[in-house]
Image: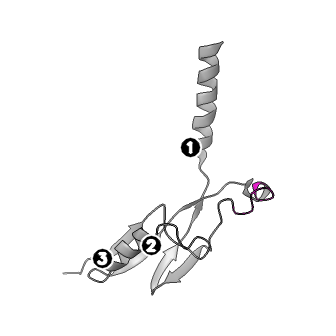
Amino acid sequence: MNSPKLLVYSSLFPSKERPNAGVFIRERMFRVGEKIPIIVVVSPVPWFPLQGFIRYWRPHFRPQPDKYECQQGVDVYFPRFTPVFYVVMRRFSERFSKSEVG
């Protein structure tokens, strides 16, 4: 029988850019990893094209970590994704509020 392995998927995990973000998650998962080997950690990072423009005014706005890091011998991936759902829902809520008012 194969021994169990652990895949960690978390929206918040520390990186070189944000070392204090989600430290509790890393510590908890690495403690569990002492008993069950961790294969990989995946922590998606929101991204959209205008982030570079926003950083002119807010230099530390959503710091983007490297796409891959190795932390304590565990592979950690930070894939980027565009939060399309947020944009769609925001437009929907604006239209809904206008239809109620006018």
- Residue annotated with mark 3: 32
Tag in front: 3 or 2: 3
Which label belongs to residue 77? none
**What is the three-letter code of the residue carrying label 1?**
Phe
- The reply, left or right, for residue 91 in relation to residue 1 is right
The residue sitting at the bottom extreme is 73
**What is the three-letter code of the residue carrying label 2?**
Val
- Residue annotated with mark 1: 85
User: In 3D space, how far apart are the residues under numbered discs 3 and 2 (Cα atoms)?
Assistant: 13 Å
Establish if 24 lies above or below 61: below
Secondary element under disc 2, as helix, strand or loop, is: strand
- The reply, left or right, for residue 45 in relation to residue 33 is right
- Residue annotated with mark 2: 41
Task: Please name the predominant secondary structure of the magenta segment in the image.
Answer: loop
Residue 52 location, x and y as percent?
A: 76, 59
Q: Quadrant of the C terminus?
A: top right
Secondary element under disc 3, as helix, strand or loop, is: helix
Q: What residue is drawn where x is 63% and y is 14%?
A: 101
